[in-house]
Image: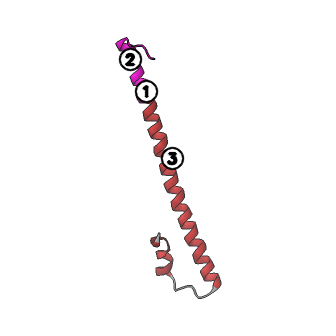
């Protein structure tokens, strides 16, 4: 998380006023929110993919059981 504010720090002087500090904190919080949202979207996407793979696997197993003549219990 320390990396979030590096662009602001290197691209401008230290905050000299309350307004500068407020802007810095708002930018930092926005960057954190953006990163959190991106990570959250990735996790949800992976969970959805895994769910689809599990569904396909269950279907394939059911097909194999049918072909083998095994009754589902």
The residue sitting at 42% across, 34% down in the picture is 53
SS for tag 2? helix
Q: Crowding near pointer 3: few (<14 within 10 Å), some, many (20+)?
A: few
Q: Which residue of the protein is positioned furthest toward the front in this rendering?
A: 73
- Which mark is first along the chain, 1 or 3? 3
57 falls in the magenta region? yes
Q: Which residue is mark 2?
A: 65
Between marks 3 and 1 in the image, the one whose residue lies nearer the viewer:
1
Disc 3 to disc 1, C-alpha distance: 21 Å
Specify the segment rendered in magenta: 56-73
Q: Which residue is mark 1?
A: 58
Q: Quadrant of residue 72?
A: top left
Q: Horizontal placement of 69 versus 52: left or right? A: left
18 in relation to 31, above or below = below
Disc 1 to disc 2, C-alpha distance: 10 Å
- Which mark is first along the chain, 2 or 1? 1
Disc 3 to disc 2, C-alpha distance: 31 Å
């Amino acid at each position: 998380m320390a990396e979030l504010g590096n662009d602001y720090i290197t691209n401008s002087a230290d905050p000299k006023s309350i307004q500068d500090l407020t802007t810095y904190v708002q930018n930092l919080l926005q960057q954190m929110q953006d990163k959190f949202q991106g990570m959250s979207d990735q996790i949800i996407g992976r969970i959805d993919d895994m769910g689809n793979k599990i569904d396909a696997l269950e279907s394939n197993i059911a097909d194999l059981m049918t072909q083998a003549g095994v009754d589902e219990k």
